[in-house]
Amino acid sequence: MRLRLPLHFRPSVLPVLAAAVLFTFGGPSLGAQDQTPVAAPPIDENQILRHLNNVITWYRKTKSQIQPVGLPTDALYQATANKLAVNVVTLAFASAEKAAPLIPSDTEQTSSSSHQNLVKLLRDTAAHNAQLQTEISQLNSKIAIARSRDIQALTDQRDRAQGELDLGNSMLNSLSQLTRAPEQKTTRTKTESANQPNPNGFEASVSQLKASLPEIFDTKNQPPPSPPAQTVGSPTGLFGQLRRIYDQSLSLRQIENLQLETNQLQDLVNNMRTPLRAQLRATLQQGRALSATADNPQAGQALPTKQDFDTLAAKFDQVAGIEVPLSQEVAALDESKANLEDWRNSIRREYGAILRNILIHVGIMVAVLGFLLLISDLWKRATFRYVSDTRRRRQFLVVRRFVIGFLIVLVLVLGFVTEFSALATFAGFLTAGVAVGLQTILLSVAAYFFLIGRSGIRVGDRISIAGVTGDVVDVGFVRFYMLELAGTGIDLQPTGRIVAFANAVLFQPTTPMFKQAPGTHYAWHEISIALKPAGNHKLIEDTMMQVVQSVYEKYQPVLDRQQRHIEERFEVPFEPLRPKAQMQLVDTGLEAVVRYPVSLRHNVQADDEITRRLLELIGKNEELQSTVDGLPRIRAAIRG
């Protein structure tokens, strides 16, 4: 029969046509309002991925963030922490992989919704066509028994129903093809997903995160194990203890930060477990309800089937597959927290022990330094009390300064330095360089100890060195200073100039130094008068001795005391200091000479008095005048 499209259709046809047209152009389907919503998974994709990222970050910090401090237990705690971290990572990925089938992608959700709409529309169209077929059969029966005047109306009604049926059959064929296409696509997609995960889906994200941990999941390409941390012995020096306590404070701070992150990660896992446990309890309650219904059937109530129990069992297994690894992960995190707490307590105990050692060490150093300062003060007081000689007192004070300074430096070095072998090597190279570069200065410092020694010089001594005569005004570690004296004959006067010599000049063999013996302040002078060949030589000699002796007697006690001081110092007897007269031949002829000791502090006065008295006696005695051949001359008996 040829299909005829009438101009007017019955109202029941319009919904079917509207649904077909709207579906063809992507509009909302008719059955969308009646579709049963798909149950959402208990946890979402973003939450799972955030959990995995946090677990990976925590795992890497656990392996590398804490710096071992050298304790014997560090290796044990570190190995335990690494083992627990690997367990946590493995459980987190196991839970994520179990949750992957329950998280459909957006495309799958849209395709599933459209396919369900097509199936519902197909069923509605088939039911409507069946109603039309029944109606046409009823009209044919009525036409066969109808009267002639009713046949035309029934025939028109049957033709309209036949047109609707033909249109419904065409739609049914099209809808059947459309419903078969999504099923084939879904089957092909599932097959491809089984072979390779979707590069843009949840499973791909989990696989990428898993690939970033080859040391856990790639058993073929395992990195070499890291060497165990070396155990550091107990430091002896203060520097070593301070460095050790600083490292331990850093480790304590790192452990505390890791404990905080472990608590945060555990809170995240517990938040993920909350809806899962709620769904498990709901599933268990549904199972108990089905069991109660099966055991106590009620009238008019359908009995649960085996499929109902299988559905609940599958649902429980899916949710339990996600929740069980998470619960094990929480237990592993608890063990990790306990391990970190034990590690932290171990370091804190060592930290307290080292801190006590530092305080005791510093206390001992302060006590020793205080004792040395007390010894220095007592030494100084005893020197000023029992040593009256200024020179000896100064020597004792210099020795005190060196001894106390050396002991203080030794205490500080022993207190602060840890590696004495390295210090000895460094000191050896340093000493060699200093010895070459500062040779003159080192010689001067060494000569200083000779200068302040028993036969050295002190302030006020008159010395002659390198052709310069002067009084010593200062003796330093590197140089000594002299007030220059110059003049003619025995009359030396200060020039006002200070002459500085390096102490190292003492070791130069071509530069001798002349000085008075310690404790002596006298020199030998001589007075001479030229004599005529004929005359009373004995008279002039006696007269000169009488004048010199009269002047010498004024200073004899001082000179005798100095002489005794020399004998006591050197423990050698010396000839007493007395004036001596003699006759001697010189280039100009015969002369009488009298040598006499004179105090350096009064030499000018003594020479002046001797000269005046001798001239006075010669002027009064004619015999003396006839014997002498010129005026008396006074000069130093020893040149230097």
Image: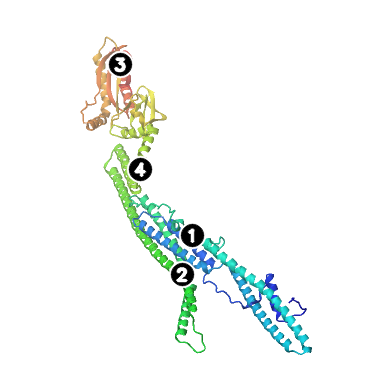
Distance between the Cα atoms at labels 1 and 2? 19 Å
Q: Which mark is residue 210?
A: 1
According to the image, label 4 marks what residue?
Answer: 423
User: To which residue does mark 3 refer?
Assistant: 529
Whichever of callouts 3 and 1 sits on the residue coming sooner in the sequence is: 1
Residue lying at the far top in this picture: please name it. 534
**Percent x, y for residue 336?**
40, 63
Instruction: Please tell me how crowded label 2 is: few (under 14), some (14-19), or many (20+) other residues with Cα within 10 Å.
Output: some
Identify residue type, mark 1. Answer: Lys
Badge nearest the viewer, 2 or 3: 2
| Between marks 2 and 4 in the image, the one whose residue lies nearer the viewer | 2
Place of residue 97 in the rendered image (x, y in percent of width and height, measured from the top left): 49, 65
* Chain-order first, disc 2 or disc 3: 2
Give the amino acid type for the residue marked by disc 4 in the picture.
Leu
Q: Label 1 vs label 4: CA separation? A: 52 Å
**What residue would you read off at disc 2?**
321
Q: Which SS class for mark 1?
A: helix
Given residues 361 and 523, the one toward you in this image is 361
Q: CA distance from mark 3 to mark 4?
A: 74 Å
Front label number (1 vs 4): 1
Q: Is residue 582 left or right of residue 273?
A: left
Nearer the N terminus, badge 2 or badge 4?
2
